[in-house]
């Protein structure tokens, strides 16, 4: 579980104080519901990032995580995305160490859940190709 901001702004367009406020508000909300911290994981909304913003986020105790494959399932069926497209986007960009960006919630307009619907087939596809799965914290573990 990681931090993704409170209201999903473009971080390159807000001042440091607002970035820190976004991180703190999301942390409070998530930890109140889960009893767990989001530290140290963070993903920039929209992937909107600059080296300066990375420094602000790092000083707040977070490590930004970037994806290598975006399924585009977040666009929903109104944008012509299907579960087959979601699956194929992953398979076309598959490589060891890939980080796949998926959204499990429903699209706000069309109600689709393309990533969640495609996930069982994706897992099967990847296992058939010899891939396994891990968590980002396990990838970041330095052996301590």
Image (cartoon, rainbow, N blue to C red):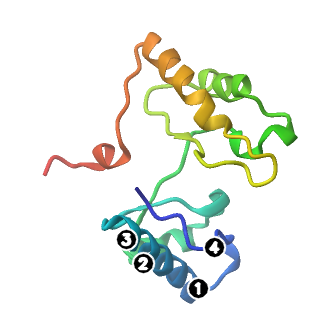
Residue 3, percent from left and from top = 47, 65
Q: Residue at x 70, y 27 (%)?
A: 83
Between disc 3 and disc 4, the foreground one is 3
Image height of 71 relative to 22, above or below: above
Q: Residue at x 31, y 68 (%)?
A: 35
Q: Name the residue under label 1.
A: 18
Between disc 1 and disc 4, the foreground one is 4
Image height of 24 relative to 126, above or below: below
**Residue 61 relative to residue 93: left or right:** left
Q: Gap in Å between the C-alphas at discs 2 and 4? A: 13 Å
Residue 127, percent from left and from top = 43, 16
Q: Gap in Å between the C-alphas at discs 2 and 3? A: 5 Å
The secondary element bearing badge 1 is classed as helix
Q: How crowded is mark 2: few (under 14 residues within 10 Å), some or many (20 or more)?
A: some
Q: Mark 3 points at which residue?
A: 31
The answer to which image quadrant residue 31 occupies is bottom left
Q: Residue 7 shows which numbered tag?
A: 4
Q: Mark 2 points at which residue?
A: 28
The secondary element bearing badge 4 is classed as loop
Q: Residue at x 62, y 85 (%)?
A: 15
Q: Gap in Å between the C-alphas at discs 3 and 4? A: 16 Å
Q: Gap in Å between the C-alphas at discs 1 and 4? A: 11 Å
Q: Residue 113 shows which numbered tag?
A: none
Disc nearer the start of the sequence (1/4): 4
Disc nearer the start of the sequence (2/1): 1
Residue placed most toward the observer, 112 or 24: 112
The secondary element bearing badge 3 is classed as helix
Q: Gap in Å between the C-alphas at discs 2 and 1? A: 15 Å
Dot 2 and dot 3 residues touching (CB under 8 Å): yes
Disc nearer the start of the sequence (2/4): 4
Residue 27, percent from left and from top = 43, 73
Image height of 49 relative to 123, above or below: below
């Amino acid at each position: 579980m990681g931090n993704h901001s409170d209201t999903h702004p473009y971080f390159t367009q807000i001042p440091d104080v607002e970035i820190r406020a976004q991180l703190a508000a999301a942390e409070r909300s998530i930890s109140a519901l889960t009893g767990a911290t989001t530290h140290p994981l963070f993903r920039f909304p929209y992937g909107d990032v600059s080296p300066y913003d990375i420094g602000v986020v790092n000083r707040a105790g977070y490590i930004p995580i970037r994806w290598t494959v975006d399924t585009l399932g977040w666009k929903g069926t109104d944008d012509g995305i299907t579960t087959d497209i979601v699956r194929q986007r992953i398979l076309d960009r598959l490589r060891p160490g890939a980080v796949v960006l998926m959204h499990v919630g429903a699209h706000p307009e069309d109600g689709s859940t393309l990533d969640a619907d495609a996930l069982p087939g994706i897992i099967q596809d990847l296992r058939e190709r010899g891939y396994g799965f891990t968590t980002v914290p396990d990838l970041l573990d330095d052996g301590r």
